[in-house]
């Protein structure tokens, strides 16, 4: 009777547990190799405290992460305070420009700014004349420290451009028109110190004639400068701001309603000449040093985490080869993914975002350019991920681990459930947009429809959504009642309840596993055969020597 043969996976090299060849060509197994791999795997899945007991190694990654949490949070707070002053200064100047240059402007607390409009030709000329007059005498009327931009010794003029169709002959009474849709532009400049007479008519005085039947848009552009003095309270030198103001008279619809909108584009630079008495010094250099130190800490964390990920992949390959040789079976993907620590991947992404955001923040401090929005997104997201990563260390305690285990166990089912529910949700979005859009403000665009339906799922503005429906068409009004009632009933009473039940069922399952024990996979069963405790001293003898090297030395 032939002795059983050992099947060897050629991709894994020599068998990990082979000691020598017997007389009949059979392999004699070495149990020390399996014991070494079990101990190696058990050490890999230990927490930092257990690893310190096992080999006496300092938990460097844990120390770096704790230091990084403090530094990233402090960096975000400092950037947030600085960004808050920048945003506040920009918004207040934008509001001031609207009151200065838009006649009869009132702060709109309920709707959008583009609700401000004029309806007659005389009003358009009147509002344009008001803008020009205010710009010319800005230094006399502005309560802020605004000034004209200079080009050399000359002041930058105000530019007026009107955009109109090249040819347009429209006769609504005869239901006829002849139009060339090509857009032409006519611009002229107004010097800041130009004298203006209030006795002449607006169109003659400004040499401006608007052909409203083919007018598309009128744009008034000018540049102003200001200095943000409020930074002195934080012992920083003020920054110089350049405001590029654009006032638009929008007549694209040709509906008799011309919308007026003011847009303010801001650029920030370091002031050239400055002198502050009282010993106030600029602390930009200290901030840049702190940001550079933050980059170094995150780079160290990135290297340590990438090293751990690489070691996990290598150990996974070693375990897969061992199982292929020793048990003649493949390792399930669930066990393979155990070696890829998702927390390390989260920390790597957080470190990359922090490094990039810190570099942009250093550029902002140096006044090279000011991508405040991009920098805030990077730093905010990185800080979010850093604090989410703190849950990993709470997960080392069994009582605090239930949230992580529930989220990880429920995630696949939640994704599949959301994919199915999203199909119904998109169907309601498209239906509401095309049917209710002409009659309901909350269904005018797909984006607004999606936000409205999501609010309804959470129980917001239900009555307001029903009441805002116009009853110009009885059929559409009746359809809206059926549409909203079926959507609310389906998603609140069924979809949302099933979603909550899915999470609750997973939570109950995790609690049951914590009482009776979790299901054991091949990996967990194999590791459980190692009974050595972290403080047994057996792990101090083990070195990071591959099993193949151990077998080589034995042979």
Image (tube, rainbow, N blue to C red):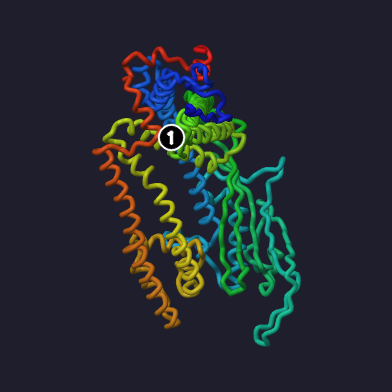
Image-quadrant location for residue 174: bottom right
Give coordinates of residue 340: x percent, y percent.
47, 34
Which sits in the foreground, 333 or 553? 553
Image-quadrant location for residue 195: bottom right
The residue sitting at 49% across, 17% down in the picture is 19
The residue sitting at 68% across, 46% down in the picture is 155
Q: Is residue 343 visible?
A: no
Q: Secondary structure at mark 1?
A: loop
> Along the horizontal axis of the image, is 240 left or right of 468?
right
The residue sitting at 54% across, 51% down in the picture is 141
| Outermost residue toward the bottom in this view | 174
Which sits in the foreground, 306 or 164? 306
Q: Is residue 468 visible?
A: yes
Q: Which residue was labeled with disc 1?
A: 338
Which sits in the foreground, 494 or 362? 494
Which sits in the foreground, 32 or 278? 32
Task: Characterize the local packing of mark 1: few (<14), some (14-19) or many (20 or more) Cα atoms within 10 angstroms.
Answer: some
Give coordinates of residue 128: x percent, y percent.
61, 63
> Along the horizontal axis of the image, is 243 left or right of 533?
right
The residue sitting at 31% across, 64% down in the picture is 493
Q: Is residue 124 above or below residue 337?
A: below
| Outermost residue toward the left in this view | 515
Give coordinates of residue 4: x percent, y percent.
48, 29
Q: Is residue 217 above or below residue 290?
A: below
Give coordinates of residue 12: x percent, y percent.
55, 28
Q: Is residue 86 above or below residue 296?
A: below
């Amino acid at each position: 009777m032939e002795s059983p043969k050992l099947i060897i996976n050629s991709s894994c090299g020599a068998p990990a547990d082979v000691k020598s060849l017997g007389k009949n060509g059979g392999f004699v197994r070495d149990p020390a190799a399996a014991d070494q791999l079990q101990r190696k795997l058990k050490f890999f899945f230990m927490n930092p405290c257990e690893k310190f007991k096992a080999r006496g190694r300092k938990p460097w990654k844990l120390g770096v992460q704790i230091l990084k949490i403090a530094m990233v949070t402090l960096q975000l707070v400092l950037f947030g305070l600085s960004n808050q002053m920048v945003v506040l200064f920009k918004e207040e100047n934008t509001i001031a420009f609207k009151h200065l240059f838009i006649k009869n402007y009132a702060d709109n607390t309920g709707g959008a700014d583009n609700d401000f409009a004029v309806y007659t030709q005389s009003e358009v000329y009147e509002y344009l004349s008001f803008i020009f007059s205010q710009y010319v005498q800005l230094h006399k009327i502005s309560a802020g420290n605004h000034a004209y931009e200079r080009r050399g010794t000359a002041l930058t003029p105000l530019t007026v451009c009107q955009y109109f169709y090249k040819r347009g002959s429209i006769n609504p009474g005869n239901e006829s028109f002849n139009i060339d849709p090509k857009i032409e532009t006519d611009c002229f400049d107004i010097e800041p110190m130009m004298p203006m007479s209030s006795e002449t008519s607006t169109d003659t005085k400004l040499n401006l004639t608007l052909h409203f039947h083919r007018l598309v848009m009128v744009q008034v552009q000018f540049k102003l400068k200001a200095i943000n003095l409020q930074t002195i309270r934080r012992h920083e030198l003020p920054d110089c701001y350049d405001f590029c103001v654009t006032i638009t008279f929008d007549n694209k619809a040709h509906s008799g309603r011309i919308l007026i909108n003011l847009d303010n584009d801001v650029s920030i630079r370091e002031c050239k000449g400055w002198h502050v008495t009282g010993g106030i010094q600029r602390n930009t250099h200290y901030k840049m040093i702190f940001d550079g130190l933050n980059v170094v800490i995150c780079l160290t964390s990135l290297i340590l985490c990438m090293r751990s990920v690489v070691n996990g992949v290598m150990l996974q390959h070693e375990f897969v080869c061992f199982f292929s040789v020793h048990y003649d079976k493949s390792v399930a993907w669930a066990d393979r993914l155990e070696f890829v620590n998702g927390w390390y991947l989260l920390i790597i992404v957080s470190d990359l975002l922090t490094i990039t955001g810190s570099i942009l923040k250093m550029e902002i401090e140096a006044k090279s350019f000011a991508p405040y929005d991009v920098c805030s997104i990077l730093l905010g997201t990185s800080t979010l991920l850093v604090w989410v990563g703190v849950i990993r260390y709470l997960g080392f305690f069994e009582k605090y681990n239930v949230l992580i285990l529930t989220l990880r166990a429920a995630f696949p089912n939640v994704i599949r459930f959301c994919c199915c529910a999203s199909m119904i949700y998109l169907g309601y979005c498209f239906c509401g947009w095309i049917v209710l859009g002409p009659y309901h403000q909350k269904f005018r665009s797909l984006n607004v429809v999606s936000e409205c339906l999501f609010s309804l799922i959470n129980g917001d503005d239900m009555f307001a959504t029903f009441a805002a429906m116009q009853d110009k068409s009885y059929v559409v009004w009746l359809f809206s009642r059926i549409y909203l009632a079926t959507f609310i009933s389906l998603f609140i009473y069924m979809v949302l309840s099933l979603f909550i039940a899915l999470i609750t069922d997973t939570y109950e399952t995790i609690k049951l596993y914590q009482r009776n024990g979790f299901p054991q996979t091949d990996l967990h069963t194999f590791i459980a055969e190692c009974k050595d405790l972290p403080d047994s001293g057996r792990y101090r003898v083990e070195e990071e020597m591959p099993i193949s090297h151990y077998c080589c030395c034995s042979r």
